[in-house]
Amino acid sequence: MADVSLALIHYPVLDKNGQIVTSALTNMDIHDIARSARTYGVKRFYVATPVKPLRLLAEKIMDHWETGYGSTYNLTRKDALGLVRLEQDLDTTMIAVEREFGDRPVLVMTSARPGPNRTPFATLRCNLAESKTHHLIVLGTGWGLAPEIMQRADVVLEPVVGPTDYNHLSVRSAAAIILDRLRAAR
Amino acid sequence: MADVSLALIHYPVLDKNGQIVTSALTNMDIHDIARSARTYGVKRFYVATPVKPLRLLAEKIMDHWETGYGSTYNLTRKDALGLVRLEQDLDTTMIAVEREFGDRPVLVMTSARPGPNRTPFATLRCNLAESKTHHLIVLGTGWGLAPEIMQRADVVLEPVVGPTDYNHLSVRSAAAIILDRLRAAR
């Protein structure tokens, strides 16, 4: 079965008007997605932002949970945050995957929008079961990954949809559902 | 198909030492779970806390998104928060369901812990498809619903598990996965 990592991208992403922006790093994203990643056996959770002060702030908060007071207060939090690595962007993330796991990862882009050539969850689930190449699932913050990132996809996953036309899940909820669909025991 | 609502309970819940406590209301819980609820066609999302100042604060924040500046800034947020009702506890929530939908709801309790008589997701999914009675899915904050709430279950849903032994999803992530497993189109 293929190893899976996650990347959460803060630049380049879209805002609600379709402009390319750098989104703010959200502490709750790191905690929630790290816990989902740990639950579903994800190897690494890369949090990528080009804003160095935000990376330093995130590192400081994680230190609290990993080696500071929080590390004895809440062991499960420490366990999940151990998967997190702070990166600048998708390029440094790919280098980090290749350095640690030896593969150039298959890039799986996610989007809440429908479009051409989307891969169904069931197909990717089967491919992961049969593949031995590391897969990096890339999530966008804000209103989603910018086109210049989407274009680098090896695979574009179909959007998560429910029985309604509403497609505005939080990235925390979308990450949880995507991992459950791809990795839950059946 | 049965209508489904969600309840998020802040008392009585457990803390990490198994003591019964009132947990703090978390703004992100309301937003994330409302958006998941809206995605999966949930009728109402009841947020229950006995702490009146926290209910008033939550109402004030929701007013910002429903009628204040936020209502024009982000329409999708307004749409999701329209499902939210603030309640005191499980009893007032059940009265609210009965008043609005005409049924005493079937109480579906959730827990991250394994235990006897858990109903599999696939079974509840079938039952929802065949039933016409309103189902209220009850989620606990903190370290989960207190035994006195669990005992009132008509159904106790099996825990969400991944391929690891880690069972510490955030309630926001668990709610998203539970709705996806029960209500996603297949």
Image (cartoon, coloured by chain):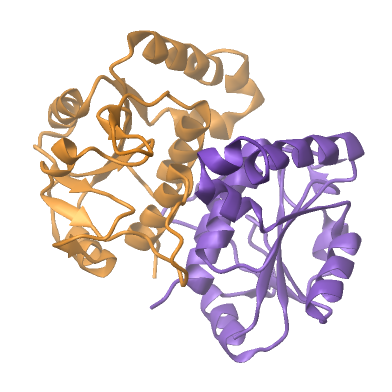
Chain colours: A purple, B orange
Residue A34 appears in the rendering: no
Residue B115 appears in the rendering: yes
Quadrant location, the C terminus of chain B:
bottom left
Res A159 → quadrant: bottom right
Where's residue B139, x and y in %?
31, 41
Residue nearer the viewer, B54 or B63: B54
Q: Is residue B7 above or below residue A38?
A: above
Residue at x 28%, y 33% (from the top left corner): B19
Residue nearer the viewer, A53 or A49: A53
Q: Is residue B140 left or right of residue A69?
A: left
Quadrant location, the N terminus of chain B:
bottom left
Where's residue B134, x and y in %?
17, 44
Residue at x 37%, y 55% (from the top left corner): B178
Residue nearer the viewer, B46 or B116: B116
Where's residue B97, x and y in %?
18, 31
Where's residue B168, x and y in %?
45, 52
